[in-house]
Image: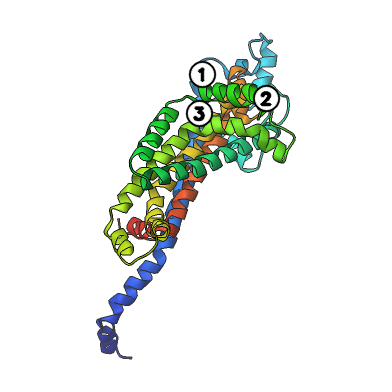
Amino acid sequence: MTATEQVQAANTPGAPSHKRDKRRAIRPAVYIVKKLLALVLTLFVASVAVFFSRFLVPGDPARFLLRGRSPKPEALEEITRQFGLDKPAWEQYLNWLGGILHGDWGRSLTYRQDVSDVLLGRLPTTLQLVALAAVFITVLGLFAGIVASLNKGFSDRFILITLTAAGAVPPFVAAIALVALFSVGLGWFPSFGSGDGGWDRIWHLTLPALALGITYIAMVARVTRSSMNEQLLREHVEVATSRGLTRGSVVARHVLRNALGPILTVSGVLVAGLLVSSAIIERTFGLSGIGQLLVQSIDRLDFGVVQAIVMVVVAAFVLVNTVVDLVQPLIDPRIAAGTESR
């Protein structure tokens, strides 16, 4: 093919269409790469903030490690050298970050063992609590929001009032009320401990999970109701209804699916934030999780454990929200296309 023929082929109507198809095909990949790069950058910035925050505490870090004792100068110098406190701050950070990437979080001064071992002993309880609370938040929040949206009048107003009241209840107040009613009053659920595993673990964690998620259930329900109401007024829903489709089919295929974007976003943020809120619930119900461990470590100035827990919480928060961002284009492909076009 001559150069003239190549130019003519490039100017044919099919060429721009082919280029548009190619750009459209790579948009999802570009969207995913952007989100993953944002994830890595966020975790890096968080690690810098978490590590250097300890330098904001006034005083000699070595003396904090000794927890108020007055050692001899040579002993203090030995501790400073042992923990690398005599090195520049940036070198300390790189050593700390390198250790984390290799699974070495340092040693706990309180428990006299590796920080990773301390966390692994507490993390399963917190993850199970958060997972059960997330199920309650998603299922009950979606159900209440859908029912309120599809049943105008008394049902809608009753659910709204109930959700508003529930959303104003602090977790520790909800915990006390749930224990008084379902544990002390009715005797249906235990009020202390995390059980022995399996269904016994779920049974013990039911009240803590409800107390942890009750405020968030109300938030998800309100967002679901608002998003559903917005979609019910769209033209395509009216067209689907006029074609004789059943109400359930219209709601499932044309209303709920298009309403899931904001619901997923809010649910992801709320579920990721459960780790932060778990400390109060764990203390109330006597659960040995990382929330209670964080409070104890701050009180005892165990910086290694505090830094590790904060990084775990931040990583979980960012990961959950990244997963939500990556799932949304599967529901609505226009999200990835819109991101690429901006």
Where is residue 47 shown, x and y percent of the image?
52, 36
Q: Nearer the viewer, residue 164 or 32?
A: 164
Q: Earlier in the sequence, mark 3 or mark 1?
A: 3
Residue at the (70%, 15%) spot, across then down: 75
Q: Earlier in the sequence, mark 1 or mark 2?
A: 1
State the residue lying farthest toward the top.
70
Where is residue 145 shown, x and y percent of the image?
41, 43
Secondary structure of the residue carrying numbered label 2: loop
Residue at the (43%, 40%) spot, across then down: 220
Mark 3 and mark 2: span between their CA atoms? 37 Å
Q: Which residue is mark 2?
A: 192
Q: Which residue is mark 3?
A: 52
> Callout 3, which amino acid?
Phe
Mark 3 and mark 1: span between their CA atoms? 10 Å
Left/right placement of residue 88 relative to residue 158 reads right
Quadrant in which the C terminus appears: bottom left
Secondary structure of the residue carrying numbered label 3: helix
> Callout 1, which amino acid?
Val
Q: Earlier in the sequence, mark 3 or mark 2?
A: 3
Q: Nearer the viewer, residue 296 or 90?
A: 296
Where is residue 106 shown, x and y percent of the image?
66, 32
Can residue 135 be seen in this snapshot? Answer: yes
Q: Which residue is mark 1?
A: 57
> Callout 2, which amino acid?
Phe
Residue at the (36%, 68%) spot, across then down: 23
Left/right placement of residue 297 relative to residue 319 reads right
State the residue lying farthest toward the front.
154
Where is residue 157 shown, x and y percent of the image?
35, 36
Secondary structure of the residue carrying numbered label 1: loop
